[in-house]
Image (cartoon, rainbow, N blue to C red):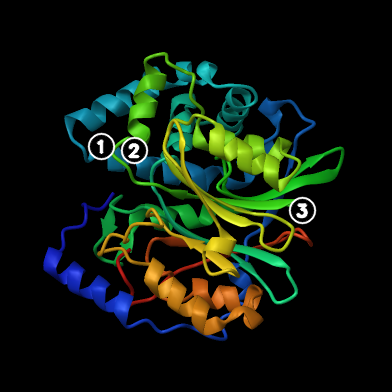
Amino acid sequence: MKTLLILSFAAICSYCLAQSVNVTCESGKYPPDPATKVSTYVINLDLPPEKRWAELGAAKSAEIKYLIAGFKEFITDWGKAGQVLIDFVDSKGGDLDGTLPYPFAGEIKGFADAIGLNLGEMLLYNLFYEFFTVCTSIVAEDPNGLLYHVRNLDFGLFIGWDTQNRTWAITERLRPVIVNLDWQRAGKTVFKSVNFAGYTGILTAVKPQIFTLSMDERFNKDGGFIGIIKWLLGDRNETWMGFLTRDVMENATSYAQAKAKLENTVMLAPAYFILGGNKSGEGCVITRARESNLDTWEMRNASGWYILETNYDHWEAPFFLDDRRTPAHKCMNQMTQKNVGFDGLFNVLSSQPVLNKLTTYSALMQVNSGRLETYIQTCKDPCTPW
């Protein structure tokens, strides 16, 4: 792992503020290079949990091992405390798998066995996604009332800066493990998602003809680490964010039912859930604390034809070093509702700083058709550091 990023605070401030003000909204970016399109794998929900990930594990074994080695190198940089955590994960971490609910314990163990990985490391790999996602999600309605849901998933902030290539080290290792998954029962699609191979939860997904969902990290003092500590100490009355979203995608049968589950389930970590339905006006951002719903912001109360979330409460100003919200709104309003579709929305996702050096992928979803397209994204210099 490369050393952690050390940059002049003043330089970062001036650069990020300039990017937020002097935004160039891109055009003509869709369709992107076909080589960046993400491949699709089937997850057969009729198989025992231990066997569902065998094919994907075999296909992505080397890439996942390389990624997990990067996570461990990052933790080792914490010094003695980091090494203690690594030793615990390697020797005792696997014991915690049995504390997870069905089917996640079996799936994580099955994936670890499929690629020959320590079970504790596989559990740690699944935990990381609860804390380090920095994202932009948009639900937008076209003039005919069709709903589109798109997102950039940014990951790897402060997890190792590669000074030679001017990239975030973990972000680079993540891109090769991005996959589209077609979750099936009896040979029929239940839902589709974008995953980092081996992560059993859900961050981005579409349930064809019913609803779409994405999750953005919510930074809060009552954060996920408190929930994880409680879980490690034996208080397991709270739900992992990724397990909740997986349950919603598998079992919710309507937009209203999905909304109710996302609003009311007690979780290990706070989050923003961005939910789109299948009817005109059905779009919202659910702002969650661990134990309660703070706010459900409806699309009709936002712009009327779109709603947008990054990683900050919509009623507060974003952190001034990380204002992706203002540029995204500028590009949405410049695009206008008449251009809502994969073409126009991909242009918004490709405009800096919505697109930045932490961006791993852009996903495009249309609920009525069940269409999901995912593209690996990279941001060439000059580009915002986050």
Q: Nearer the viewer, mark 2 or mark 3?
A: 3
Sequence-wise first label, 3 or 1 = 1
Instruction: Provide the residue designation for mark 3.
Output: 208
Residue identified by numbered label 1: 76
Q: Which residue sits furthest front?
A: 301
Numbered tag placed on residue 346 in the rendering: none
Look at label 2 and name its amino acid: Lys
Categorize mark 2 by other alpha carbons within 10 Å: few (<14), some (14-19), many (20+): some
Q: Is residue 362 visible?
A: no
Rendering coords of residue 63 (x, y %): 50, 48
Residue at the (73%, 68%) spot, across then down: 146
Residue 11 location, quadrant: bottom left
Label 3 and label 1: CA atoms lie apart by 42 Å
Task: Choose the circle earlier in sequence order: 2 or 3.
Answer: 2
Vertical side of 23 occupied by 55: above or below: above
Asked whether the beta carbons under mark 2 and mark 1 sit within 8 Å of each other, the answer is yes
- Residue at 34 percent of width and 36 percent of height: 223
At label 3, which amino acid type do we have? Answer: Pro
Question: Height in image: 193 above or below 82?
Answer: below
The reply, left or right, for residue 267 in relation to residue 367 is: left
Q: Secondary structure at mark 1?
A: helix
For mark 3, does the 10 Å Cα neighbourhood hold few (<14), some (14 to 19), or many (20 or more) residues?
Answer: many
Q: Is residue 352 visible?
A: yes
Q: Which mark is residue 72?
A: 2
Residue shown at the point (69%, 27%) measured from the top left: 49
Element at badge 3?
loop
Q: Residue furthest top?
A: 234
Residue situated in front as seen by the camera: 261 or 232: 261
